[in-house]
Amino acid sequence: MYDVAVIGSGVIGGLIFRKLTEYKLSVCLLEKAGDVCMGASKANSGIVHAGFDALPGTLKAKFNVEGNLMMKSVADELGVKYRENGSLVVAFCEDEVIKLKELASRGEQNGVKGIEIIGRERLKEMEPNISDEAVGALFAPTGGIICPYGLALAAIGNAMDNGGELKTDFEVVSIEKEEGGFTVKSANGECVTSRAVVNCAGLGGGKIAAMIGDEIRIGARKGEYLLLDRESGSAVNHTLFFTPTEKGKGILVSPTVDGNVILGPTAKEQADGNVLTSDEGLAFVSKKAGEMLKELPLYNTITSFAGVRAYSERHDFIIEESESVSGFFHCIGIESPGLTASPAIAKYVVEELMAGRYGWERNPSFNGRRRPDYFFKDLTAEQKNAVIAKDPSFGRTVCRCEQVTEGEILQAIRENPPARDIDGVKRRTRSGMGRCQGGFCQPYVAQLIARERGIPIEKVTKSGGKSYILMGVTK
Ligand SMILES: Cc1cc2nc3c(=O)[nH]c(=O)nc-3n(C[C@H](O)[C@H](O)[C@H](O)COP(=O)(O)OP(=O)(O)OC[C@H]3O[C@@H](n4cnc5c(N)ncnc54)[C@H](O)[C@@H]3O)c2cc1C
């Protein structure tokens, strides 16, 4: 029997899983997909919000500010790229400047440090490409950017290195409360038993809650994005938001931590988790982003994508032990700023809700440090030569656009949590994320996956399930 089973391997489940391995426990992470981090944590804006947006007194406000303060050290420990680039909420008229003052005062109540309202001239110095219509902005120096799936992957990998067990293709379909714990059953009949369970199933969180008799409705709201090539990376320095309206935060224009520019998201209610983009949504994104900057190099668009927010009708995070079933914890309805809040939520759930109550002891052999997520291309010539001397596979470039080497791809397939398909390699190495979007490197990546996993190349998938890329041998 496990001490704790965590359901859902997004950034919330991933960081809770890692935090649990700081204690002497047996822990498992259950994920319905074939790879980790396949929900909202895979497709979002990647912004580490400063914390002026959430209403004071909410869990969103508390964990946003705490998570923002923790993010740098967590990213350092896990070797994940993170940059405190600062954010600007831009006003385009005097009424919006009044709104900025409200946001500034909310930020102060929430405990955000260093926020200030700046005028047109300073804004232009900070963002030379800002629209001439902009009249001022709210500057939050503690706003940052991070790779969201990079954070989740590193946390899960680190937890596995510390003894945590991952079970993918484990779709939880029923949960039985028994003497001393729970039996959690998957769609393919596999069972795990556990003393405690943490529900971090994102959009599936309401269904999991219903399995123990709790009624929590989780809604779905899609956000669509455009991504520009790294060539356009200098178009913007800070994360730029429009002044929020009653309809919400609106779209943003921001650099990403990998040097691209991200535009979006839209916000549209839907019944399910489908992540299809639409002409209408993407046209809206490009039109609004065009209003923010003088020059927006849309011709450098390399891809579009969508993510789906899981929100609760409480309009706040739900982080609590079930009222009816002892030992069952919910961490659901985690919409934005859930990525930012994730380290603080993990600390709260494990240290404050669970550890004391169960009398857990610290794990003295826990090592929170992970190999830095370095990219071969960022090394100096001497460093590159030293790496190639040890392992010649780093001397063979597989993805030309992002300059990813064979060594990095093999590492992604071999280390925790192992990549099993083309998109899994892509998220771990950036191979296929450049201008040609995998046109050149995909066949080589497929060969490496087939060889490493000992499967025929026709069995290699793009993204798990039946997403095969080859039908069979023709010659
Ligand atoms: C468009 C958009 C933009 C956003 N921008 C930001 C931002 O800039 N900054 C920020 O701080 N936050 C942002 N967020 C919010 C952030 O992405 C989420 O708060 C966070 O990713 C939620 O993580 P999670 O682990 O709760 O859910 P998820 O990442 O969705 O993970 C849930 C996991 O549970 C699994 N699962 C579901 N059902 C089952 C089952 N029955 N059995 C087993 N596994 C199951 C899923 O497959 C999934 O892997 C944004 C969200 C969206 C959608």
Image: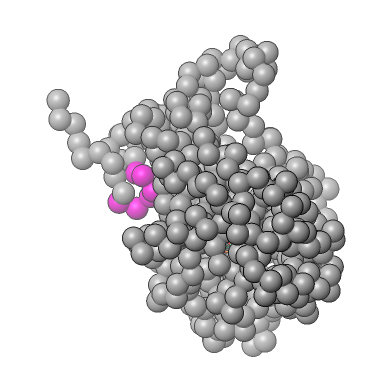
Q: Residue furthest left?
A: 475
The percent position of residue 161, horizontal first and vertical second, equals 66, 43
Q: Which residues are magenta?
A: 461-466
Q: Is residue 440 above or below residue 75?
A: above
Residue 249 shown left or right of residue 458 in the figure: right
Residue at the image point whose x is 50% and y is 47% from the top: 296
Position of the N terminus, as image quadrant, is bottom right
Residue 128 occupies which quadrant of the picture? Answer: top right
Q: Quadrant of ligand 1?
A: bottom right
427 or 363, which lies in front? 427
Residue at the image point whose x is 51% and y is 19% from the top: 393
78 or 295, which lies in front? 295
Residue at the image point whose x is 85% and y is 61% from the top: 113
Residue 289 shown left or right of residue 254 in the figure: left
The prevailing secondary structure element of the residues shown in magenta is loop
167 or 471, which lies in front? 471
